Amino acid sequence: MLLIFDLDDTLIYTHRVFMQLTRQFLERMACLGFDDENVYYTLDSIDREIVESEDAYVPWAFPAAMQRTYQFYCEKYFVPYDEYEAAALADLGSSFREADYQLLPGAKPLLDVLNAAGHILVLLTQGDYEVQNFKVRQHNLGQYFDEIIVVNKKTEEVYNSIMRLHGLAPQDTAVIGNSLKSEVAQALAVGARAILLTAAEGWQFEDEEVSGDYAVARTLAEVPELLR
């Protein structure tokens, strides 16, 4: 069977890294006098706007959102815009590139079990190539996969091309990930099976109404049984 795995918040915790950086940003903004309760929502809104306009998870989105949020509040409260402060916030926002990403419990044991069962494992992740490969190398995940693919955006054609490359039909393919939008909906659209993993909190931008049947795993340990 062909198993297409997501990376972020499926095998490694990613959202919590961004939330930690967001908390540091909010603390810094409060120190600057911007303790408006809407600072978080402003940051999130600008971040979403950038991702939507680029139609991809570009690596400069998060640091740019921090800078633009700072600029917005400087203008709102008539505070001089400090280039040094803006640069420091951009550095904070960029620090996710080489953060300490932690594996979800059971990630490597699961991959060991699936490899031993003879499945073909493909890691399909979206985002910046260097950033995503840093995460893979950090935990030596490359050894578990027959192929690792980094794309700007997961689409039906991406999934179809993987199935064609490995010569397996949709009914012999399963997609495992935490996103309704990028994994479950796309898998169902191409006729593959889908397993939604709910073990880690993800970005709400990846939520989407999905029609069709799919399995839900609360932990990675539940995945093998759902593949039977």
Image: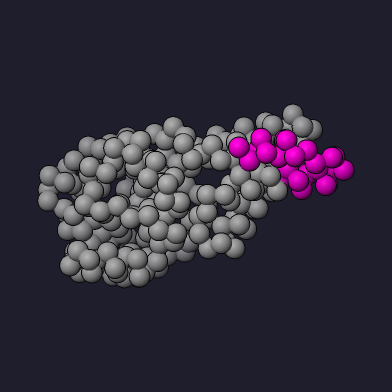
Residue at 17% from the left image edge and 42% from the top image edge: 113
Q: Could you say where residue 17 lies in the image, as x and y percent from the top left?
A: 50, 37
Q: Is residue 221 visible?
A: no
On whether residue 88 falls in the magenta region, the answer is yes
On whether residue 111 falls in the magenta region, the answer is no
Residue at 62% from the left image edge and 58% from the top image edge: 49
Instruction: From the viewer's perspective, tell me whether residue 5 is left or right of residue 132.
Output: left
Depicted 221 relative to depicted 32: above or below: below
Q: Residue furthest right?
A: 78
Type of secondary structure dominating the magenta stretch: helix
Residue at 28% from the left image edge and 41% from the top image edge: 141
Q: Could you say where residue 69 lies in the image, as x and y percent from the top left?
A: 71, 46
Instruction: From the viewer's perspective, tell me whether residue 18 is left or right of residue 144.
Output: right
Q: Could you say where residue 117 lies in the image, as x and y percent from the top left?
A: 12, 48
Instruction: From the viewer's perspective, tell me whether residue 52 is left or right of residue 207.
Output: right
Depicted 169 relative to depicted 68: above or below: below
Residue at 47% from the left image edge and 64% from the top image edge: 209
Out of 91 and 118, give the one closest to the viewer: 91
Q: Is residue 125 visible?
A: yes
Q: Residue furthest top?
A: 31
Q: Quadrant of residue 200?
A: top left
* Residues rendered magenta in the picture: 69-91
Q: How many marks?
A: 0
